[in-house]
Amino acid sequence: MALDQRRDLVAALADFYGGHPDVERHPMLAEVGGHLAAALDADGVEAPEPMALPVARLLDGIDAGSDVPGVGVVLSAFVAARPVLRWIQTPAYAATLSQHFLDNYGYVRVLGPGGLVESEVASAGLGIWGAGLHYPRHEHPAEETYHVLHGSARFQRGDGPWEPKVVGESVHHDPWERHAQRFGDETCVLLWAWTGDVAVNARLVSDD
Ligand SMILES: [Fe+2]
């Protein structure tokens, strides 16, 4: 039963990326979708030890229904799998960010090191940020694409403008491109995909 929930989540992400119109602009998404689909074909969905985090409670308050293609399926699978997932936070953030931030933030790795599908070259998963949080400027060596699945956020790339994004919209970051997010007045769920150096975690960048 539990493995079915994990498998359903992997399948939902594979379907989301498979044939997504953003693949044309961001070929990395085809790579990520290919890893997920291959794992389903090869019975390669794993069952990492579940781990709870306070942020998972925010899934109680979200509406998993969405008219945006693919989004409702991913959110429903995420909510269903919640108790068997391994909820994590970027380890260095625990020493830096406020308790309020840490109580309202966390993610689940579906693909990547320690994920439901093991990979050293690609990563993908679902993150939650509570309403009103500010995720300070950070950077990482992996190329990244985010899709907003619930709520809204404003994204800043480098020193550029803060761009509002709603459900179904995406944001792309080049390797080492600095970025920050400010979340809207609802729980925000973001689907992220990384390719390249996925073993190196994001790190906060001081504004000095
Ligand atoms: Fe990022």
Image (tube, rainbow, N blue to C red):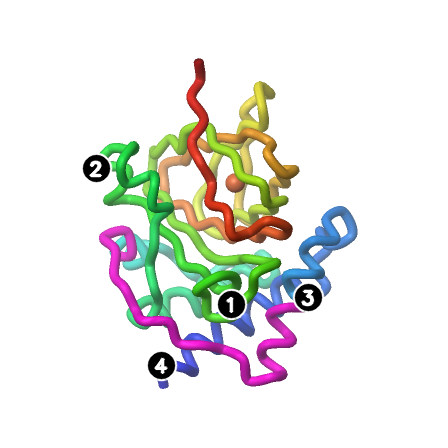
CB of mark 2 within 8 Å of CB of mark 4? no
Q: Residue at x 52, y 64 (%)?
A: 111
Secondary structure type for disc 2: helix
The image position of residue 47, as x and y in percent, is: 39, 76
Secondary structure type for disc 1: helix
Q: Which residue is mark 3?
A: 18
Please tell me how crowded label 1 is: few (under 14), some (14-19), or many (20+) other residues with Cα within 10 Å.
many
Q: Is mark 4 within 8 Å of ligand 1?
A: no
> In the picture, residue 204 is in which quadrant?
top left
CB of mark 3 within 8 Å of CB of mark 1? no
Specify the amino acid type for callout 1: Val
Q: Residue at x 59, y 49 (%)?
A: 197
Q: Which residue is mark 4?
A: 2
Q: Which residue is mark 1?
A: 73
Depth order, front residue of 16/194 = 194
Please tell me how crowded label 2 is: few (under 14), some (14-19), or many (20+) other residues with Cα within 10 Å.
few
Q: Is residue 113 visible?
A: yes
Q: In front of the other: label 1 or label 2?
A: 2
Secondary structure type for disc 3: loop
Specify the amino acid type for callout 2: Gln
Depth order, front residue of 72/81 = 81
Secondary structure type for disc 4: helix
Gap in Å between the C-alphas at discs 2 and 3? 38 Å
Q: In front of the other: label 2 or label 3?
A: 2
- 159 vs 1, left or right, is right
Gap in Å between the C-alphas at discs 3 and 1? 14 Å
- Which mark identifies residue 99? 2
Depth order, front residue of 38/76 = 38
Comes first in the chain, label 2 or label 4 = 4
* Magenta stretch: includes residue 39: yes
Gap in Å between the C-alphas at discs 2 and 4? 31 Å
